[in-house]
Amino acid sequence: MKYYDKIENFLIMVVLATMGIVLAYQVFMRYVVNQPVIWSEELARYLFVWFTYIGASYGVKRKAHIRLEFLHKQLSKKAQAIINIFSNLLMIVVFLYLVPPGIDAVQYQHQLLSSAMEIPLSLIFIAVPIGLMIVSIRLLMDMIEELKKLIGGEV
């Protein structure tokens, strides 16, 4: 898992840095050189899609996903662990249920090309099933940790 974390962090940094460079280049070319670049906005948008799905996995790792914190903190540690396990399981089921339609969308989009860069749209749409799967893996790992605490009597 340590290597997975490093790869995920590296990918997030690369995508964000590339997005920043591309957008800075676009601004420079548009306002300084007066020669707008048509592919830069499209690339930044596609990078943002990938960043969103990789970032969702990072958010699960940091436990930064949305929950009713006030209500959650009012419960005992054992009840919190049980709710965390149940909510993780529910999210895993929903996300894995959405993977096959996501793959279908990728296959459908493979024949279509993006307007400016003329790359297959499947390269962008593949972020959806990949993102859902890596988030599910993170949720499963979190659920296992919560189960270990619950069974071990730590909560």
Image (cartoon, helix red, strand yellow):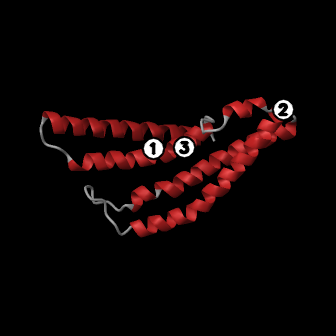
Label 2, on which residue? 154
Residue 25, x across and y down, in percent: 24, 37
* Disc 2 from disc 1: Cα separation: 35 Å
Does label 3 or label 1 sit earlier along the sequence? 1
Dot 2: what SS? loop
The residue sitting at 56% across, 53% down in the picture is 132
Q: In this view, does 97 lie to the left or right of 119?
A: right
Q: In which quarter of the image is residue 154?
A: top right
Q: For the residue marked with disc 2, what is the amino acid?
A: Glu
> Dividing the image into 4 quarters, which one contains the N terminus?
top right
The residue sitting at 78% across, 38% down in the picture is 81
* Disc 3 from disc 1: Cα separation: 8 Å
In the picture, the disc for residue 51 is: 1
Res. 144 in view: no
Does label 2 or label 3 sit earlier along the sequence? 3
Does label 2 or label 1 sit earlier along the sequence? 1
Q: In this view, does 47 lie to the left or right of 128?
A: left
